[in-house]
Amino acid sequence: MHPLYLYNTLSRRKEEFSPLVPGKVGMYTCGPTVYQYATIGNMRSYVFADVLRRVLEYNGLSVKMVMNITDVGHLVSDADEGEDKMLVAVGREKKTPWEIARYYTGAFMKDAALLNIKRPSVVSPATEHIEEMLEMVVELVEKGYAYETGDGIYYDISKFPSYGQLSGTRLEEQLAGARVQENPDKKHHADFALWKKAPKEHIMQWESPWGMGYPGWHIECSAMARKYLGDRFDIHTGGVDHIPIHHENEIAQSQSCTGEVPARFWMHGEFLLVDGGKMSKSLGNTYTVDDLVAKGFEPLAFRYFCFSAHYRSHLNFTWPALESAQSGLRSLRTIIQKSSKDPAKAGAQEKAERFRASFLEAVNDDLNMPRAVAVLWDAAKADLGPWLARLADDFDRVLALDLLKGATREDKVLALSELPPEALAILEERRLAREAKDWVKSDRLREELKAMGFAVKDTKGGYEVTRIPRQD
Ligand code: AMP
Ligand code: ZN
């Protein structure tokens, strides 16, 4: 048996994991803001959380995973600055905030399903938990951790001496920091809004002891985690960008109410880069799962690609890298599926057991997925016969790459009726060129088909056409 080690941002080291209640894990994952499509960067974070959940389950634990949906109160900057993201979307799309939230929640769920991300046990929209948030804000005010200003209720970080424990910044530094164009009513620049008073024209607003208003973003997660997982639970996850502000603030709020840091383990996924840099709207590289599909990739190629780096390392997305991930995944599937029809091999079961142990060791070493995938490749090359398929089926509980499912749509040999007329015309021209043994022309026509997204393979009876992923 290999114990499970997870890196805890709070202690800055790998720790052996065992749940607070034997056999059961409570896990909270900061969910998406639903005012736009999720990027593949966002999805990398959720693939990480999904792998964590699956590894816990692979270790025989039952997991209650809670994920919020941020459908209110998220400003452009994490630190209470900039515009309200929902207002930006309302202006852009001429829809109500509720319509926008519903639409993008659905889009997120679809992307998650395409990436074989399991649905969390609880998916909780912020707008359905305003009461729980208000209760916590009132508690914080009553206990003296918060103060009222002209525009809202703010958490007073000077009242929380351990503020900064997650990111390792000292409270004095936080208190000293000041920036221009800041809210002059705040006591310290790092104080953050628990509740905002809403101007009349603000679209989403609720009654509160301070008049109409809406919640801050951070209180959302504290309130929902407390409601569904209690004052103390096992694991809290998010992206590395959450460490210095969002999770620091969550800890401050929750601990001020309950006396305890809410989660024992805090785990953070590192960012996905695109072409070596940050994804950004202005560079036009904020790709979505739909963009990958539109170029002919299957979504699981992206999941497989995510496993090429450890979750605490940067991962650099490029189209050629995705292309090679897709062909790697498909080769694996082909080897695995073929092996299930092979005759049994002597000694294969013992070898398979050793691979299983190595796989468990890899995933239990703080989710070392590059190593786990390497174990699968080693197994694929080890002549295990039908044991390879059994092993892959077992590993797929964590990998979730559909290793044993039939060929994917893109692998499929296309019927002529599925091809556009231009391609059919070129194929016919090529057939004639080959009959005339004009190999140069035949190759040129193959290239033309390739440019249209089709691969042609010559067979005894004629040819087979499959789709190839585009990359540009
Ligand atoms: P948001 O919807 O903007 O709140 O982001 C949802 C999740 O995606 C958060 O956990 C972020 O930390 C994470 N995230 C944002 N950008 C990236 C990125 N480039 N790579 C990985 N995760 C990201
Ligand atoms: Zn959160």
Image: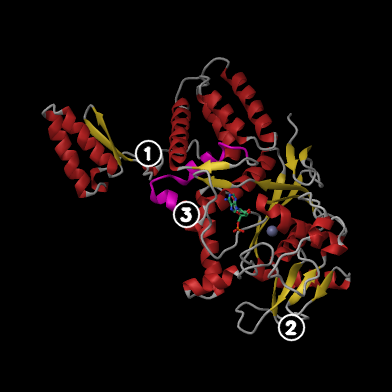
Foreground tag (3 vs 1): 3
Observer able to see residue 46: yes
Which residue is painted at 81% across and 51% down in the image? 165
The residue wearing badge 3 is: 283
Q: Residue furthest bottom?
A: 200
Please state which amino acid type lies under the numbered disc 2: Gly
Indicate yes or no whether the magenta region holds residue 298: yes
Observer able to see residue 257: no
Task: State the image coordinates of residue 19 (x, y, percent, origin top left).
Answer: 79, 44
Q: Does label 2 or label 1 sit earlier along the sequence? A: 2
Left or right for 143, reference 446: right
Residue 298 vertical position relative to residue 140 in the rendered view, above or below: above
Which residue is painted at 72% across and 54% down in the image? 244
Q: Does label 2 or label 3 sit earlier along the sequence? A: 2
Left or right for 127, reference 222: left
Boundaries of the magenta span: 291-310
Residue 285 vertical position relative to residue 69 in the rendered view, above or below: above
Asked which secondary structure carries label 3, the reply is helix
Q: Residues within 10 Å of mark 3 (few under 14, many from 20)?
A: few
The residue wearing badge 2 is: 211
Indicate yes or no whether the magenta region holds residue 470: no
Residue 157 vertical position relative to residue 184 in the rendered view, above or below: above
The residue wearing badge 1 is: 411
